[in-house]
Amino acid sequence: MLLAEEFLLLNLDDTSGKLLVGNDKLEPALRGALLAELALRERIGITPDSDGWSRRRRLTITSLHPTDDRELDRALDYLSTREGKPIKSLVSTTGHRRFGKGLRNRLLDRLAGAGVVTQEQSLILGLFPHRRWPALDPLPEEEIRQRLHSALVAGLTPTESTVALIGLLHATRRVTKTVVSETPREVKARAKGLAEGDWVARAITQAIQEASSATGAASV
């Protein structure tokens, strides 16, 4: 399962099948998840802060070798001509609009096809089609939550993939809403510590903050 699918699954209500996070956070997180996954698979990288303010935190292409995953290869193909672009602009919903377009629905279809969730269709006001995605097989989500619990509550050393997922949750302020603990402050602090060095989490946070600022300015 891709990081983007894991994040999406964690943010679906098991019973109602409704999303628990708004598009202002969901879309940057899903785009960021693609970048994180490609980085973990050594297809892309990021320029270091030592390159200076004007050249730091920009996309580098490491390899264009296919990943054998349709969504990752679609993303890699798009990114192949965007080397040197700021990571933040790739994550932002106001930046590269084609990047990750339609990703949420495609991932939901994949999860349904794998039997993890089921699709329910209805009409709002008898006119507008609406889809929900209740849980069908709880085991995949339980496994993800166990990994998060091990890292954030038990204090075990997480894998790079789990750190990336924690970074996504931290950037979207979903850590303590996802990981149940009697010490939520400690969980939040550990998540922050793990996410601090995560460039994807930083880019997502910046994109969400900018989107929130733009919305606030427009409403004044």
Image (cartoon, rainbow, N blue to C red):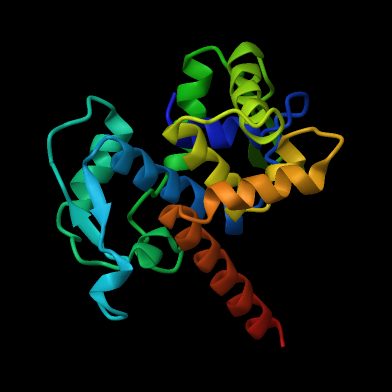
Examine the rendering and report whether any part of residue 56 can be seen: no
**Left or right: where 7 falls relative to 3:** right
State the image coordinates of residue 63 (x, y, percent, origin top left). Answer: 13, 42
Residue found 55% across the figure and 47% down from its top: 194
Q: Could you say which quadrant of the image residue 183 lies in?
A: top right
Residue at the spot x=51%, y=50% of the render? 29
**Residue 190 place in picture, x, y as percent:** 65, 45
Q: Nearer the viewer, residue 116 or 131?
A: 116
Q: Is residue 57 left or right of residue 148?
A: left
Vertical relation: 81 (above or below) 16: below
**Which residue shows up at 55% across the image and 62% down it?**
205
Q: Quadrant of the C terminus?
A: bottom right
Total tally of numbered discs in the picture:
0
111 shown above or below 131: above
**Can residue 89 be seen in the rendering of this structure?**
yes
The image position of residue 10, as x and y in percent, is: 64, 32
Q: Position of residue 213 (x, y in %)?
A: 62, 78
Q: Quick one: quadrant of the N terminus?
A: top left
In this rendered view, identify the residue nearer to me: 59 or 132. Answer: 59
Q: Nearer the viewer, residue 115 or 213?
A: 213
Q: Quadrant of residue 94?
A: bottom left
Residue in the foreground of this view, choosing between 170 and 220? 170
Q: Extreme bottom residue here?
A: 220
